[in-house]
Image: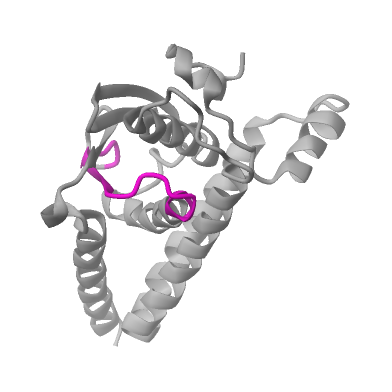
Amino acid sequence: MAHWDNRTEESWKKFAFTQPYQEGLARLKEEVLAETDYDPCVLWQWGNMQAMAVIRILKDCEREFGEKGQRVVCEALRKVGLDVGRQMLKGFSMPEGVSEAELASFYATVVNRIAYASLEDPSIDTEDQVSFDILWCPHQDYYGAFDCRVQRYFVQGMLDAAKEQGLLSGWQVRFTRTIPAGAETCRFVLWRAPDGEKSVWESYSGQLEKKALEMAQGEAAGLT
């Protein structure tokens, strides 16, 4: 069984989603992995290079172009996340007998295990809250604690894709600890938010953006 298809809840079997980038995925499985001695571990090295490039692009644009440069890069990341989310939810229909909490947890599993190629330990805590621990993330050995902010925009796009389908309206997400900051796991909580908490994710993103610009300005001043 593929690692992304391994959940114990009976209702998980009802949650149908589509693999993103299907054509390239099929080629990899059928023409490369099945017919050559290609080592799939190099995909991690290649992907890590792409991830480090995204961080470098964002930081350099913040330093060179300030808020405008930051906005352009972050919006580009959000668009990519939106596209991936739309691919995963293509043709989706709400399965009978699946609660909204299960839906939130199952969608998070698809995002974590496929889009982020990570290992997770999910939990459906209550009808209004789910959580998960990231046990291993491909970026954990090379990301700095502040670098994880770039993932917020991919995630925001994937949440936007879910909301286009009428899913997870009113749900919010926050992290409580991260591996790059020294924790054993990255822990995230998704909850059905009351009106006063419905912009937590966006608000915290704004705080990080402001801090990043301050850091970029300080770096720029040190280079002159």
Task: Specify start and end residues of the magenta stretch as a single range.
Answer: 161-180
Left or right of 43 on screen, residue 11: left
Q: Tell me residue 12's x, y (percent).
A: 48, 20
For the N terminus, give its image quadrant: top right
Residue 207 shown in magenta: no
Left or right of 166 on screen, residue 44: right
Q: Name the residue furthest front.
A: 96
**Residue drawn where x is 35% and y is 24% of the image:** 122
Is residue 49 shown to the viewer in this render?
no
Left or right of 31 on screen, residue 163: left
Q: Nearer the viewer, residue 97 or 168?
A: 97
**Residue drawn where x is 29% and y is 88% of the image:** 224
Q: Name the residue furthest bottom.
A: 224
Reply above or below: 194 against 60. above
Locate residue 125: give its quadrant. Answer: top left
**Residue drawn where x is 44% and y is 70% of the image:** 75
Residue 170 shown in magenta: yes
Q: Nearer the viewer, residue 202 or 163?
A: 163
Q: Tell me residue 20's x, y (percent).
A: 64, 43
